[in-house]
Image (spheres, rainbow, N blue to C red):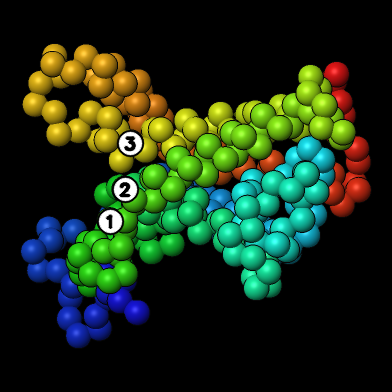
Amino acid sequence: MATGIEPASQSGPTGVHDASRAAIPARHLRTDRWWLAPAGTAAGLLAFVVYSTWRAFANADYYHAPYVSPFYSPCLADNCHTMRGGPNWALFGSWWGLSPALLILIFPLGFRLTCYYYRKAYYRGFWASPPACAVAEPHRKYTGETRFPLILQNVHRYFFYFAVLVAGILTYDTVLTFRDDHYRWGHMGLGSLIFLANIGLIWAYTLSCHSCRHIVGGRLRHFSKHPVRYRLWGWVSKLNARHMLLAWSSLISVALADFYVFLLASGAFEDPRFF
């Protein structure tokens, strides 16, 4: 499968050894541990992929009243059992026999996979394209995102709308955590705070997206004629400056929220209730 990145050819000098390069024997002149950043990025992303894959296919321990794992919400099939008074949308009915999480994760996964920051992260961490600044990539040539499958990165702007929808549903789930086991309002547990922090980070990451910034303030000739959009664009731009931090923070928080529900559902301990 073509990736737009081709391995170095053995037929002649290419890439860092191309004839157009300055006559420097070393592949680069960096003396610091430049490899730590791409190695750490690859390790972090790989850890999340392994964990989320396990949880997505587990099809168990994803609900403990009043918490439902963000990996499994919303429930779109009959085999998604949350026992919350019938909130399942059951759009896929009873014929869906696999884990219901597989119906949901494609949308946040597609949004993150095509995210501008995550592209940089896994291009460098996994494909070494390039591995770091001032370090040449070990590929014969790079065609950018102009060929399949990398050209599919352009669907990021459309995944943004699905990401907003998913964030809205997770917000609803977060509101429901302020109930007790009998669905009475005015209660709060440790899980409520975890879900609240998670949804805050998810919204911050989603709104810091470059596509969101363009939707809010793009294609305008005069900001002075659109003061409201200009103010919104300013807010989104401030979030956009922290896009990398929010990307990692929300990735960790959604995994922690799921893991907390798993611990409760598996009987590891009971959720501490504050009131």
Alpha carbon separation for disc pair 1 and 3: 14 Å
Q: Amino acid at mark 3?
A: Cys
Which is more N-terminal, label 3 or label 1? 1
Q: Residues within 10 Å of mark 3 (few under 14, many from 20)?
A: many
Residue 229 lies in quadrant = top left
Q: Is residue 9 left or right of residue 48?
A: left
* Residue underneath mark 2: 157
Q: Residues within 10 Å of mark 2 (few under 14, many from 20)?
A: some
Alpha carbon separation for disc pair 2 and 1: 7 Å
Residue 172 lies in quadrant = top right
Q: Kindly indicate whether the residue at mark 1 contacts the one at mark 2 (C-beta within 8 angstroms).
A: yes
Q: Amino acid at mark 1?
A: Asn
Q: Residues within 10 Å of mark 1 (few under 14, many from 20)?
A: few
**Percent position of residue 98, x then y:** 67, 70
Residue at x 84%, y 49% (from the top left corner): 265
Q: Amino acid at mark 2?
A: Arg
Residue 151 lies in quadrant = bottom left
